[in-house]
Image (tube, grey):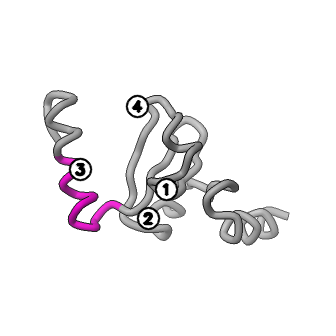
Amino acid sequence: MGKSAIARNRQICRLRQEGRLTLGGNRRLKIYGLLSCRSGKRMLTGNRVFFSGETEAQAHGYRPCGHCMPEAYRCWKTQQG
């Protein structure tokens, strides 16, 4: 994405504006959610990952956020048993 933090941030902003990044995730907790989620905004920059959709996030082993995606979280929770 870029060698410096500024270059990476510019690239991320551009991809968001183009609609190619729709979800963000926490690398350490393996949780994904909306980019506008208040929980996601508090996470450390080093733990952030971005996804183009739910399918991509789930393929990488992430679960939905209970705050900003309650319906998807409930479905995931029932599947876990």
Q: Name the residue under label 4.
A: 45
Which residues are drawn in magenta?
A: 11-21
Q: How far apart are marks 4 and 1 (CA)?
A: 19 Å
- Callout 3, which amino acid? Cys
Vertical side of 62 occupied by 4: above or below: above
* Residue at the disc numbered 2: 56
Secondary structure type for disc 2 = helix
Front position among marks 1 and 3: 3
Q: Which of marks 3 and 2 is nearer the N terminus?
A: 3
Going 60% across and 39% down the picture, which residue do you hit? 29
Residue 9 is left or right of residue 22, and the answer is left
Do callouts 2 and 1 mark residues in contact (Cβ within 8 Å)?
yes
Query: Counting other residues with Cα less than 10 Å from the Cα at mark 2, is it few (<14), some (14-19), or many (20 or more)?
Result: few
Could you tell me residue 8's position as x and y percent?
A: 20, 38
User: Are dots 1 and 3 in contact, CB under 8 Å?
Assistant: no
Of residue 72 and residue 28, the one placed in the foreground of this image is 72
Identify which amino acid the numbered label 1 is placed on.
Answer: His
- The residue to which callout 1 is attached is 60
Left or right, residue 70 beside residue 19: right
Q: What residue type is labelled 4?
A: Thr
| Residue shown at the point (52%, 44%) measured from the top left | 40
Mark-to-mark CA distance, 4 and 3 = 14 Å
Q: For the C terminus, which image quadrant?
A: bottom right
